[in-house]
Image (spheres, rainbow, N blue to C red):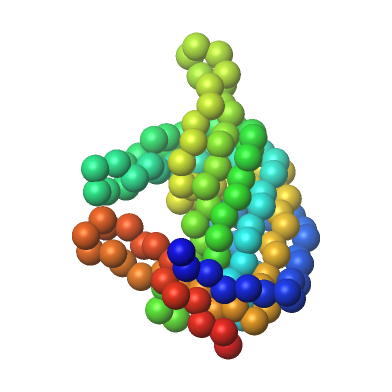
C-alpha cells in the first residue's frame, strides 16, 4: 500500500463555462493555483464527449459523440506527470441512444461543458505524481512526496 496523509484541504467550488472543455479547464485551475494533489468531482451536462477504457494494454474509445450526456457520477484525481498537471477523470454518463437511455463508463478525455459544476479538494502539503508503468502501459500514482 502506498499513501501519504494530509490534514489540510483547500476547496474550490465553481462551474465550467458553457462551451469550455471540462478536463482542460480543471487542469488549468489546478495549474494556476499550484495544486499537485487534488480530488475532483463534477456534475451536470456535457456535449462532445470522448470516453476511453483501458483494455488489453491500451486505451480504446468507448464513445465519441455530441450527446448531450448527463453526468451520473464524475470523480477524478489531479497529479503531476513530470512538470505537467494531469487530470484522470472517470465518469458514468447517461446518453439517449437508439435503444433509449444508455449508461457509459470510462475515463473522460474530452468533454465540452453545457451546464457543469465542480468541486476540487486540494491537498495542500502533498505532491502526487504519475509515471508510466512500461509493463502495463498505465500511468499509476507513485510515491507521494511532501512539499
Between 131 and 95, the one lying in front of the other is 131
Question: Which residue shows up at 64% across the image and 81% down it?
Answer: 125
Q: Residue 83, percent across and down?
A: 44, 81
Q: Residue 79, percent across and down?
A: 51, 69
Q: Residue 36, percent across and down?
A: 57, 76
Residue 31 visible from this viewpoint: no
Between 55 and 16, the one lying in front of the other is 55
Q: Quadrant of residue 50?
A: top left
Horizontally, is 136 left or right of 30 in the view?
A: left
Q: Residue 127, percent across and down?
A: 54, 78
Between 73 and 5, the one lying in front of the other is 5
Between 134 and 81, the one lying in front of the other is 134
Question: Which residue shows up at 53% across the image and 52% down it?
Answer: 89
Question: Which residue shows up at 63% across the image and 61% down it?
Answer: 39
Q: Quadrant of residue 38?
A: bottom right
Residue 51 visible from this viewpoint: yes
Q: Is residue 19 above or below residue 8?
A: above
Q: Which residue appears farthest toward the bottom when viewing the image?
A: 147
Number of numbered discs on residues? 0
Amino acid at each position: 500500500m502506498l499513501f501519504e496523509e494530509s490534514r489540510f484541504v483547500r476547496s474550490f467550488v465553481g462551474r465550467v463555462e458553457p462551451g469550455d472543455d471540462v478536463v482542460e479547464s480543471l487542469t488549468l485551475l489546478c495549474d494556476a493555483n499550484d495544486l499537485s494533489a487534488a480530488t475532483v468531482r463534477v456534475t451536470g451536462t456535457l456535449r462532445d464527449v470522448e470516453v476511453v477504457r483501458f483494455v488489453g494494454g491500451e486505451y480504446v474509445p468507448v464513445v465519441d459523440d455530441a450527446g448531450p450526456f448527463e453526468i451520473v457520477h464524475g470523480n477524478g484525481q489531479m497529479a503531476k506527470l513530470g512538470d505537467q498537471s494531469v487530470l484522470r477523470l472517470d465518469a458514468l454518463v447517461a446518453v439517449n441512444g437508439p435503444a433509449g437511455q444508455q449508461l457509459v463508463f470510462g475515463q473522460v478525455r474530452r468533454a465540452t461543458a453545457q451546464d457543469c459544476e465542480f468541486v476540487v479538494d486540494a491537498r495542500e502539503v502533498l505532491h502526487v505524481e504519475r509515471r508510466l508503468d512500461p509493463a502495463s502501459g498505465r500511468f499509476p500514482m507513485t510515491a507521494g512526496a511532501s512539499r
